[in-house]
Amino acid sequence: FKSVVGIAQKLNPRIRGWINYFEKFRLSNLHKVFKLLNQRVVRWARKRYKRYKTSIRRAYSWLTRVQHQYPYLFYHWQLGFLS
């Protein structure tokens, strides 16, 4: 994907489906899944952008900035599953 917006557009229907299915049973168990998903976005950023290849801390700060600037980008961010 060229941008994080493209990733969000691809994953949001799937994330919404997971939440709709698991909200009746154990929505809190999805916290681990969303944490892993955020880690995968950081991994993508480290591969995509040269400045984040050497520093995982810098990549996580990038993710935090994206979460604050675009809190509705990923569906699980809208519900408070940040990182």
Image (spheres, rainbow, N blue to C red):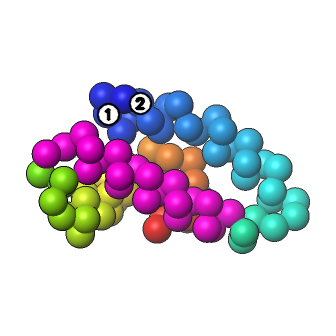
**Can the viewer see residue 77 in this picture?**
no
18 relative position to 75: left or right: right
> Which residue is painted at 19% across and 43% down in the image?
49
Residue type at tag 2? Gly
Q: How many marks?
A: 2
Q: Quadrant of the N terminus?
A: top left
> Which residue is painted at 66% across and 39% down in the image?
14
The Cα–Cα distance between marks 1 and 2, rounded to whole angstroms, is: 5 Å
Q: Label 1 crowding class (10 Å Cα cut-off): few <14, some 14-19, many 20+?
A: few
Q: Residue under circle 2? A: 6
Residues at badges 1 and 2 in contact (C-beta under 8 Å)? Answer: yes
Residue type at tag 1? Ser
**Can the viewer see residue 60 in this picture?**
yes
> Which residue is painted at 45% across and 44% down in the image?
73
Q: Is residue 31 magenta?
A: yes
53 relative position to 78: left or right: left
Q: Label 2 crowding class (10 Å Cα cut-off): few <14, some 14-19, many 20+?
A: few
| Residue 16 in picture, x, y percent from top left | 68, 43
73 relative position to 43: left or right: right
Q: Which residues are magenta?
A: 30-50
Q: Secondary structure at mark 1?
A: loop
Q: Secondary structure at mark 2?
A: helix
| Residue 27 in picture, x, y percent from top left | 75, 65
| Residue 51 in picture, x, y percent from top left | 12, 51
Most foreground residue, 81 or 70: 81
Most foreground residue, 48 or 67: 48
> Which residue is painted at 73% across and 48% down in the image?
18
| Residue 66 in picture, x, y percent from top left | 31, 53
Of all residues, the one furthest to the right in this rendering is: 24
Q: Residue under circle 1? A: 3
